[in-house]
Image (spheres, rainbow, N blue to C red):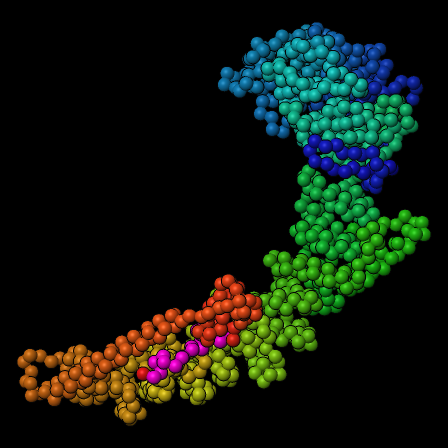
Amino acid sequence: IKRRKCTEKSKGEFLDMSDDSFGFTVVELTTRYDLGGVDKIRSLCLSPHSDSQTLVYLGTFSGSLLLLSLDTSTNIVARLGTVSLSASPVESIFVLGQERGKVLALCNGYLFLVDSLLSRPAKRLGGVLKGINVVARRVRGRESSSSTDLLLLPSEVSAESSSSKKFLQMIGGGSRVSDVKGKDLRREGVHQGRYVFAVAISERMLLIELQCDEEDGKGDSFVVLKEIVGIVGVKTMVWLDDYVVAGTDKGYSLISCVTGQSGVIFTLPDVSGPPLLKLLCKEWKVLLLVDNVGVVVDTNGQPVGGSLVFRRRPDSVGELSFYLVTVGDGKMEIHQKKSGACVQSVGFGPEGCGPSVLAVDEAGDGNLLAVTTMSKVIFYRRVPYEEQIKDLLRKKRYREAISLVEELDSEGEISKEMLSFLHAQIGYLLLFDLRFEEAVNQFLKSESMEPSEVFPFIMRDPNRWSLQVPRNRYWGLHPPPAPLEDVVDNGLAAIQRAIFLRKAGMDTPVDEEFSSNPPSIADLLESAIKNMTRYLEVSREKELSHPVREGIDTLLMLLYRALNRVEDMENLASSVNNCVVEELESLLNESEHLRTLAFLYASKGMSAKALAIWRLFAKNYSSGLWQDSDDLVPYLHENELIRLSGKEAAAAEAARILEEPCDPELALQHLSWISDINPLFAIQVLTSDKRTEELLPEKVIQAIDPQQVEIIQRYLQWLIEDRDYNDPQLHTSYALSLAKSALECVEVQNGNQETDAGSREAHDCNVGSISLFESDVRERLQTFLQSSDLYNPEELLNLIEGSELWLEKAILYRRIGQETVVLQILALKLEDCAAAEQYCKLSPDMPLKLASDTILRMLRARVHHHRQGQIVHNVSRALDVDSRLARLEERSRHVQINDESLCDSCFARLGTKLFAMYPDDTIVCYKCYRRLGESKSVTGRDFKRDVLIKPGWLVNR
């Protein structure tokens, strides 16, 4: 076998097939048959007779038609009969349907009809059918819409048919010619066996319909459907649908059977061989040859795809599945139709043995072909595609094997089950050849491959999932599965062994890429793990049994650990997974992937173990044993991604666990350290609606540090407002806690009234660094005192009696019914006359004596506040005028610059340059001013933060 290579080109480019390369076996020799004598074979035709028998018709140069029978089960050839047609060569043979039992042959310019077994003398069709050069049978394409009506007689064509369907009406019927007397088929309305042919005679072309008698052949006749003139020198023809492609010495033409018009597809060079056509039945296209160049055209004569360049001009061309077969000069070459690659070359005769004829059993299974040389017939059968793929895989030609599989799939010649099997088989061989990415790509294409088949590559047998691994039977081309470490070691050893054998002169398949640039073991192992991880990630989406799902997730975690993909480990552990904790627990502990282990514990409901790990994290970070990373940890809170420190992240994850249904004692046990880190997380635990068993308020308050006042307040608020607790003691405790916080805030406010910053601190007074409330503590206290009726007002009054919480006192005094005290507080202490009037609801009919004392105090307080306001207003105006004057004085300052003046920053001479002067009298050039800015001088003083006060500015007034 000679092998050739072919480089695929884009549309319109040539495919060179003349160089040698490796190929594979597509066909194998079946048997040979020698006619003997001096008679040579001119034409050949194969026709299936049964599942195990094929009839072979041979036309000789002496004008005889021979019939052979090939038993495909035993490969025995028998000669059945012969019939003499004329003294001229038999140019072509057509079998007119197996059920009709007729054979049409062209010999000496005439058409002859004979029965399929050659048991009777041949009958020549006379009339106008003489001097015939070429005969072509009409073939209906896959998408033909008018082919049926073209076979009908003129009387059967409806007036509503399309233009192509009105073909017989347009030509005005046809003349029936018969050289034997018989029945009038049109009068009976029965058409025994109709076959439509195009015959080229001199300068015209006739489209005829043969009507064959099933019985004795006496009724054989033909009808001329149409005559097309002006077609000269036709040597080869193909009739597809409504067009005839004709080849002459000048070129190829496309002829419409409907209109009779013809157009040139392309012309032939002055020096070229005779034209040659081949109908490609699978694609319904036509191959046109110009010497050794093949061009594929569609039914409209338009080129499709790239051209094919053969090594020599073929004598004959055949179609074998999705291959093209060419013969000539004693050799047969097989090419892929799409890529043009020559995959096999077979010698069947000596060079210069004369023209050869090729025929394929296109009417049967399409796997049998025959080649003639002189007086011999050689039969070949296509090798089953399984054997072709095996041959390629043994030679480690994986790309060609994959291409063949894809070609089989596109041609519909392979079942889905076998396709999946082949992808898996190729994937295994690629994997053992250390081409892990390509192997996994093939695994993913296999629909029948079970994910558990790769388990032995990750974990050694025996293991928990050994019984889940199916024992699929492959072709035995690869060793049994083994851990990836062993696969890499054995693969590298096999490569070294193959290189050694090749150097020793043995023909051993070697991956050239690996042999020229062998990768390291570490790189190969990393590639293997990455791609196996990719396969398991995709497999997680499949519908699988629970044990297999457990194996996938557990082994995927092991692969993530091997690659140190911490984020993927944590994502898998924190999501819904089927990991087996017992298989991972010790390994994750050893590798110190404690966060992953904590997530895994939590996902499996092992809350106590998960919380112990998070507490350990928080403790180590807080004590300084572990240094908290500057890179904040991402944390998903209420569908919003926030970033926390390591200590806060540990508390957040612990809080997330405790929010779910769990043992109340467990929540109380871990509440303290969570609240120390972030009170918000503690509140999430205490106020969770997901908990099925409520926490006892008494135990919660005991578990919280008394210093964490806001946490207690927020918890009590949640119990009262959201849970509708009506316990008076609980309401009183909440009110007392708010009152104590309010007193503390008032004290802080009174101690920080000197600065604005202090005032802001007092206003935002909260215990702890993180506020749990949006409103001020006094506002919350006042709201609660007005809304609740269950607290004890006397206890609260005893607590705040000596404080400045006048509004709170007014609310409490009102609760106990002391209306006069409430009115005095509103009018005198709070000086809110409107509130006082509204509270006591004074009316014109009330005696003045009853309200005189209160009204007198109100009037005095109002006058006092009015005068106090005037003083503040006048002082503010004075300060404003003084500041304006100081600003004017500053802007009116002058500075003198001479030739010796220097920039205080870069020490460059100022000269006539632009310069700037700061309030501290430093002078800089404009360039340095742009660099420093307008608020910061060369001395480093920032005048926005550190205000400059000069003598005379409000100081001496």
- Is residue 941 found inside the magenta-colored segment of the image? yes
Task: Please give the name of the residue rendered at 19% of the width and 86% of the height, measured from the top-left corner.
Answer: 828
- Is residue 226 found inside the magenta-colored segment of the image? no
Give the main secondary structure of the magenta stretch: loop
The x, y position of residue 231, in whole percent, is: 69, 12
Q: Is residue 56 visible?
A: no
Name the image quarter holding the N terminus: top right
The x, y position of residue 590, in whole percent, is: 69, 76
Q: Which residues are magenta?
A: 940-956
920 versus 279 height, above or below: below
Q: Nearer the viewer, residue 456 or 11?
A: 11
Q: Nearer the viewer, residue 496 or 221?
A: 496
State the residue lying farthest toward the right: 504
In the image, 226: left or right of 794?
right
785 versus 287 height, above or below: below
Task: Please give the name of the residue rendered at 57% of the width and 70% of the height, measured from the top-left corner.
Answer: 907
User: Would you identify the image quadrant in which residue 380 lies?
Assistant: top right
Task: Please give the name of the residue rendered at 48% of the width and 82% of the height, measured from the top-left corner.
Answer: 675
State the residue lying farthest toward the front: 899
The x, y position of residue 109, in whole percent, is: 77, 10
User: Would you identify the image quadrant in which residue 605 lies?
Assistant: bottom right
In the image, 163: left or right of 773?
right
